[in-house]
Image (cartoon, rainbow, N blue to C red):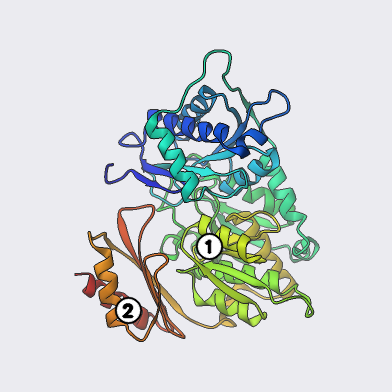
Amino acid sequence: MSDTLMISVSGIRGHVGIDLTPELVTRYAAALGAWIRTSATGQTAATARDARPAVVLGRDSRTSGPMFADAAAAGFMSVGVDVIDVGMVPTPTVQLAVEHHQAGAGLILTASHNPIEWNALKFVGPDGIFLDAADGERVRELADAGPPRLGWDGLGVRRTDPDAVARHLDAILALPMIDVTAIRKRRFHIGLDCVRGAGSQAIPQLLERLGCRMSGINLEPDGRFPRPPEPVPENLGELGDLVRRVGADLGLAVDPDVDRLALVDERGAPIGEDYTLAFAVRAVLDRRTTDAPAPTVVANLSTSLVVEDAARAAGGRMVRAPVGEANVARAIRDEGAVIGGEGNGGVMLPALHIGRDAPLGVALILHLLATNGVTVSELVAASPRYTIVKAKGPRGQNLEQWYHRLRAHFSDAAPDERDGLRLAWADRWLHVRPSGTEPIVRFIAEAPTAAEADALIATARELLQ
C-alpha cells in the first residue's frame, strides 16, 4: 500500500491517478456488489422486477467523480447488481436513498474534506450506515480474491433517480421538531459557501423553501475548490467577509460532500464546528416535554464539552463513542439516542436517518434561532466557554509505547483507550489518535483557555519525541 492509499473499514481513499484509479474503483465496486449478492440483506433487497439486488451510487463534485462513477457502475453490473445512480448529491442523500430503495448497499464517491487531489469510495450498508469492521473486511477479501463476474445473461442494469435530493429535503421539512412557519417568519438572510461542492445541489433549495434570502459564494459544483475544503475557521475568511458586506444574519459553510456544517456569526466571525452540534442538540432537546424520559446524546471522543454541556442543561445523558461516523451511528442506535454527531459539524438525527447531515443541521439551527429570537453570537455568548485546539504530526511506529508515556505523565486523568488515547479532566481533555484518512497522528485538546489547550498538545508532542 502506498503512503496515500488509505484502506479503512468503510472505504478507500487515495490520490487520483496515482493510487486511486478506475481499475481499482471497478474492482472494489464489484467486490461490494458480490458482498451484496452473498449477504442475506442483498438477497432480500432484490428488486421485484428482476430479482436482482441493487446498489445506490452517488458522488460529490470532484473532477474525477464522473469517471469513477462509470467505473463503479461497470463493476456492479459485472457481478449482476443493478445500479441506481443518484448523481452528484450530498452524502446523506445517498444514505437516505439506500433506505428508500431498500437497496443492498450504497457507494459514495467522495473524499469529504480531503484536498482536491484526493477521492474515495465510501461503503454504505442496507441500513444507510457505513459498513462495520466485519462487513468491510469481507468486501476487502472479495476485492483481493477477485469477485466472480457474470456472463452476458446475468449483468445488472443502470438507471437514474433524479428525485433523491427532493425526497431528502421533504423529509427534513416534515420533521415535527422543526418549526418551518417560525423560520419563514424570520426571513433570514444567509451567507452560503459551498466550496464548489455538492452543497449547491441541496442547500440553496432548502433555504428557498424555508423563506430565506441567500447571498452565496463558491456555488458552482465543478470540484475546483477555491480554498482548502475543510470548513474550519481558518478557511472561512471569505464567507465572513460576505456576511459583513451584505449584512447577513449568519453564514453557512459545508464541505464538498455536505455532511459537515460550520457557522459564521452575524459579525462575520467563524465560531467553530463544535457549536453546530451543540446548537442542534439544543434545538431538539428544547422541544422535549418535562415528563419525557431523560434523552441520550451521543458524540465522539473528540467532540467539544459544549455539546456535553448542552445535553446536560436539558437533563440529557451524554455517551461518547470512538471517532468515525459508523461508530457514532451504531452508538446512537444501540443507546436509543435522540440526537448525536461529531464535533466536526456533523449532525445525526435518528428520526430522519443515522448519518451526518448538513442540510438537517441547517434546518435545526435556523429553528433554534427563530424560536428563541436570538442571534448566533448571542447563543455562543450564553454557552460555557472552552477553546479547542487541533494539530497534526507524523505517525510513529510505536503508538502504544507513546500512549503508555502519556498515561504515566497525566496520571490524574481518566483514560479512554477505545480510539487512540483520550485523557479527560473535569474541564479539559486531550485526545491523540492515528488518523483514518491521512498518514498522520491527530492531536486534539480542549480547555478553558487556548494557552491551556496548547500546553496539553505541546506536552503530548514532547512525549512523542
Q: Is 366 placed left or right of 90 in the picture?
A: right
**Quarter in which the C terminus is drawn:** bottom left
Q: Element under label 2?
A: helix
Q: Is residue 464 above or below residue 395?
A: below
Q: Residue at x 57, y 31 (%)?
A: 37
Q: Residue at x 43, y 42 (%)?
A: 120
Which is more toward the observer, 124 or 286? 124
- Residue at the spot of label 1: 345
Query: Would you name the residue on which mark 2 appears?
Result: 456
- Image height check: is 309 above or below 1? below
Q: Is residue 265 visible?
A: no
| Residue nearest the viewer, comparing 202 with 171 | 171
Where's residue 380, x and y in %?
57, 77
At a point 66% along the width and 65% down the height, the residue shown is 336
The crowding category of the residue bearing disc 2, from other C-alpha atoms within 10 Å (few below 14, some 14 to 19, many at least 20), is: many
Eye-nearest disc, 2 or 1: 2
